[in-house]
Image (spheres, rainbow, N blue to C red):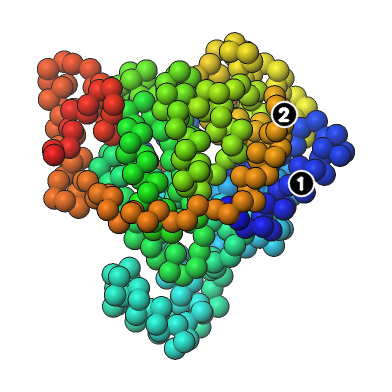
Amino acid sequence: MRFPFALSAKIAAHIIKHKMRRTPKFAMVLQLEPLHTCNLTCTGCGRIREYSTNLKDMVPLEKCLAVAQECDAPMVSICGGEPLIYPKIEELVQGLLTQGRIVYVCTNGMFMRKKMRDYLAAIYTPAQEPILQRLLAEKLISAKEAETIRQADASARSKLVIRPTSWMYWNVHIDGLEYTHDLIVEREGVFKECVQAIKMAKILGYQVATNTTVYKETDVTEIEEMFKFFSWLGCDGHTISPGYDYDAAKKDMVKRLGRDPKQFFLTRDMTRQKFARIMDWGRAFTIFGTPVYQEFLAGRRELTCTAWAIPTYNIRGWKAPCYLMTDGHYGGYAEMLEKVVWENYGVVDGKARDPRCENCMVHCGYDPSGALGTNYQRGDNWKNFKYNFWPRPKPFAGGDKVIAYTGVSIGKGHLAEAKAAVKAADAAGSQHVGTFCGTGDEAKPLGAKAE
Ligand code: SF4
Ligand code: SF4
């Protein structure tokens, strides 16, 4: 099966329950942002620019668990900010699992190995030694770290930790191969750390997904190579969504990077071009998202936005109308459902009901539409059923041939190279077009990788 049976069954039961009750609007995935603090400053991230990133500004644990109960979404995606910075992340994951939810920890990967060492320390007995030896052999932990695990004291052994379970996924942010990813996250070495963390997670029995945003400059050939590589590493699934020029990200582009957002984010036509092969990707790799949503991305059909099905809760409340756009925050999910005029948003028959929605095809607005049967076409239910319950694609056999390390690992300080190019462009008074984020298929970055 493409997804664990219990998880697919839970989601299907949730939809059937609400259809039978004729609930007009209900939550499928809660995007829970317990904090907005992050250790990175990725290009295109609106979160760390729109909200306070002060560690004092956090949603208390009890409130996080209460809002999950309140909206009763079967899946909770813990995002942020970097959720592994949240001081009570272990309690939060455990609490959501106890509520019976499917949990995604959306992380940039930088603290994953630390959390998994905590797990090893908590469960260590000499019987774990073969695993420790394997981690050492693959250089995923150091000799000193292995010793710390072996010598764990009572407090480390009794610490609440994030354990592997089929109900939880590490959802690792990966926007391309090494060169591209490190440029987008604006720090060298991040891609390599993510790969190490994913390898370690798979050895320890965790489920891992990758989470990718496609921008205007993203080279889709590289995205396919990325899928091959991470499928070969044993990842259990891949989320992919088009980048969208939401206000906070747009303002940051202009102010901090001196870039024209139009050079970075996708229009609807561009999205359809980039995602033209997504159905093939869905057959070859375990792409998360319904086939109906994939057809929408590929430009084969229209869908109506159902942003209410993937609500976001953060330090200011229930964010409306969606994960991307902020027209207000509400105290309760039901209040938000009632007060927001949902008919004012989305694109219907090619016409944007709000100009800010014009280019949006993101998964948090449209993926649930595919599952909930808005714009239903004959055969959709069977298509979705087959996609979920059929055998999942095998790990890509030739993934070891992918040249994943295209940046700092092969001796290129490419961020320095890119920054120098920006300075040179500044000095010459030119626009920073094509300077960041990837091996673009339109404008080659100024700091383009040497062959
Ligand atoms: S890791 Fe995530 S939250 Fe942090 S800056 Fe990057 S996109 Fe934003
Ligand atoms: S189309 Fe939906 S998800 Fe996209 S920006 Fe508009 S309201 Fe948000």
- Name the residue beneath numbered marker 1: 14
Q: Which mark is residue 96?
A: none
Could you tell me if the residues under marks 2 and 1 are in contact, i.e. CB atoms within 8 Å?
no
Residue at 28% in and 70% down = 139
**Is residue 63 visible in this depiction of the protein?**
no
Left or right, 335 with respect to 287, comes to right
Q: Visible in this render: residue 140?
A: yes
Along the viewing direction, whichever of 30 and 174 lies nearer the viewer: 174
- Residue type beneath disc 2: Arg
Q: Quadrant of residue 417?
A: top left
Q: 200 above or below 269?
A: below
Q: For numbered disc 1, what is the local secondary structure?
A: helix
Q: Which mark is residue 378?
A: 2
- Residue 435 picture location, percent across and down: 23, 27
Q: Nearer the viewer, mark 2 or mark 1?
A: 2
Quadrant the C terminus occupies: top left
From the top left corner, tell me how far across and down residue 60 is, in percent: 62, 51
Q: Quadrant of ligand 2?
A: top right
Query: Would you say 114 lies left or right of 241 here?
Result: left
Q: CA distance from mark 2 to mark 1?
A: 22 Å
Instruction: Report x, y in % for residue 105.
Output: 53, 53
Q: Secondary structure at mark 2?
A: loop
